[in-house]
Amino acid sequence: MQLLSGRAWSLRCVRLQFPHMSLPLSSAPAPAWLWKGDEPSVTSVFQPIVDLLRGEVIGHEVLSRGPGEFREPHVLFTQARLEGYTWELERACWTSALRCISTLPEAQRSAPFFFNVSPDVLSDPRFGDGSTEELLARYGLNPKNLVLEITEKAAFEDNALLQRLTRQCSALGFGIALDDFGAGHSGLVTLVNSAPQFIKLDQALVRDIHRHSYQQHLVKSLVSFAASVNATLIAEGVETWNELAVLLRLGIRHAQGYLVARPAPVPVLPSVEFEARRHEAMRALDFREDEDDETVGSIVIRRNCVERPVTPEELERLFQQKADVDHVAVLHSERLEALVLRRATATKGAAQVAPLIVEDRMALTTLARLAMERAPEALYDPVVVTDAQKRFLGTVTMQQLIRRITELLERRTPA
């Protein structure tokens, strides 16, 4: 993969400090299995990363495929390293990927794309030539569209350099992910020095996790750690529903793997079948685990509702006439069409918001967790409640939720 602009990074002083770099360099032109003139010989495929709570795709990992006998990534990268063409291969991968991304619809181009990159390539002497900045601009992209997955296939001894490189990447706007965590050299030292926003569990920790209690305890502890440092934990290589069920129970909320979707030439969404089974798995997980648990249905209130069509002017008059109303549900045949907030009508932007929607049988504790995971600007928005058939039942405010959970905690605490 061709990397980032050295002009922006001021890395020229770094080059002379690391003569131990293990990348062999070749002065010969890149072979045809890498480049054909200005055209990369590699192709790109995309695999989605899914938010299991909401069924939404949060990004795509970009994977590379070589021509003919070099199609498999491990064969392709091993051959490039042996012949001294690692940099040329990285450049071909980035060029192919960015070219593909630039042809996507605008809505898809904005989603983050995850790129594998090794620390030795980040610190390659050619790293600071400014070509990647130019490459991104050529295809109408910027660092905010990309997440760099730091992956270590060999030991990287200079932790200070790794820390400096990842900090500079973040300062430029790139996201940082630690790939293959729990395997090889992608361990705790790398985690500390890269401080990633995303931690991707190696598939060795995921494979058959439903059969191994030791793996389950380890993943559970990593879920707690990731939450404490505000990092997103992603399970890679998920292939079976048994694995996914246990990962969900342990607190994993993001996944990637053949079960979700196979790599494809263009970004794809999970299948309808996957979405249906994911929804059932979440329902089974989110509802009461014991008799003391209360459900959302116990506190839902049906507040002000209007049937569509309704104009913005009519909604504004409603808010003016009823000072105690802070939100209104717009319905059509008992289905929610929109949720309109009083605070939103005071701005020039859209009055509608994208609410958190849950079923009435969900446990209150589960709702509290989901509500607190929302973006800061939506943290105190009301929650929409439906039945299993998606019919609108009412809303729950955060004040209601906090008050009721506090009451439950006081009731369960011994005097």
Image: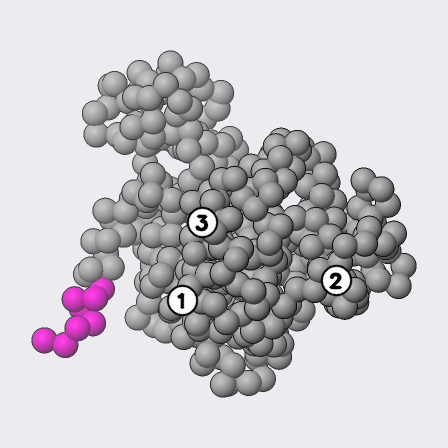
Disc 2 versus disc 3: distance between alpha carbons? Answer: 27 Å
Give the mark, 1 or 2, whose residue is nearer the N terminus. Answer: 2
Q: Which residue is mark 3?
A: 168
**Which residue occupies the foreground of this view, 228 or 6?**
6
Q: Position of residue 396 (x, y in %)?
A: 32, 45
**Which residue occupies the foreground of this view, 204 or 399?**
204
Q: Which residue is mark 2?
A: 84
Q: Would you place residue 28 above or below residue 340 in this image?
A: below
Looking at the rendered structure, the kind of residue marked 1 is: Val
Label 2 element class: loop
Tell me which segment is drawn in magenta.
Answer: 408-415
Can you see residue 184?
yes
Q: Is residue 266 magenta?
A: no
Looking at the rendered structure, the kind of residue marked 3 is: Gln
Taking the image as shown, residue 144 lies to the left or right of residue 270, namely left
Disc 3 versus disc 1: distance between alpha carbons? Answer: 16 Å
Q: Residue at the spot x=85%, y=54% of the render?
A: 31
Q: Would you place residue 196 above or below residue 7 in this image?
A: below
